[in-house]
Image (tube, rainbow, N blue to C red):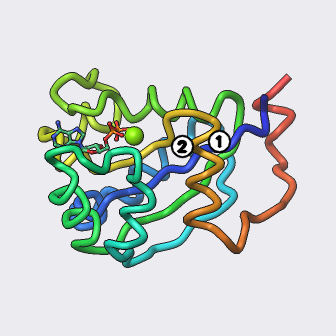
Amino acid sequence: STTERTYIMIKPDGVQRGLVGKIIQRFEERGFKLIALKLVQSTEEHLEKHYADLKGKPFFPGLIKYMASGPVVAMVWQGLDAVKTGRVMLGATNPLASPIGSIRGDYALAVGRNIIHGSDSVESAEKEIALWFPEGTVQYASALESWIFE
Ligand code: DAT
Ligand code: MG
């Protein structure tokens, strides 16, 4: 649906490398609508909730430390098939397997420094949006909507 929402997060390495503007630009230019945005220094406790499904993986402790090592940009983008299209825009989990033209394929090399997160299903998107934006998202009319959707 055109109101599908996905949780996109620029990881600490993406922020440090100055890729925030370029990443936001890709979502804007594709036609997605920004409905929440903030810069956050997260805690290990909060990140363990975000990555609860990966608890027990050998890389889990390193992942949590990396994600807490600096601020992240938390965002919610809305639009047609936002979750699946967002994942295509990100590329594969391993940047080396990501096509050129995808965010990870253009800006990253290592799986443990892959600069961006995107929800993998509508269900996890809704969970992640609730976790990172308990205050809710922002409602406003988009003047472009009828030019982007039928
Ligand atoms: P994705 O971020 O593509 O949804 P995921 O949810 O399986 O991938 O894993 C979350 C993050 O954990 C991923 O972005 C990077 C890290 N990660 C995954 N597999 C890894 C591995 N084999 N070694 C190191 N880090 C890994
Ligand atoms: Mg994931």
Q: CA distance from mark 1 to mark 2?
A: 6 Å
Q: Nearer the viewer, residue 139 or 141?
A: 139
Q: Is residue 61 above or below residue 116?
A: below
Q: Amino acid at mark 1?
A: Phe
* Image x and y of residue 86, in percent: 51, 35
- The answer to whether the residue bearing label 2 lies less than 8 angstroms from the nearest atom of ligand 1 is no
Instruction: Say the numbered circle drawn on residue 32.
Output: 1
- Which residue is located at x 76 percent, y 65 percent? 138
Q: Is residue 34 left or right of residue 13?
A: right
* Image x and y of residue 60, in percent: 22, 52
Residue projecting furthest to the front: 56
Q: Nearer the viewer, residue 34 or 120?
A: 120
- Which residue is located at x 21 percent, y 33 percent? 95
Quadrant in which residue 131 is drawn: bottom right
Q: Secondary structure at mark 1?
A: loop
In the picture, the quarter occupied by the C terminus is top right
Residue annotated with mark 2: 27
Q: Nearer the viewer, residue 64 or 149?
A: 64
- Which residue is located at x 25 percent, y 35 percent? 106
Quadrant in which residue 125 is drawn: top right
Crowd band around label 1 with a 10 angstrom C-alpha radius: few (<14), some (14–19), many (20+) = many
Q: Amino acid at mark 2?
A: Phe
* Cβ atoms at labels 1 and 2 below 8 Å apart: yes
In the picture, the quarter occupied by the N terminus is top right
Q: Is residue 33 left or right of residue 85?
A: right
Q: Is residue 5 above or below residue 88?
A: below
Q: Is residue 122 left or right of residue 106?
A: right
Q: Nearer the viewer, residue 53 or 118?
A: 53
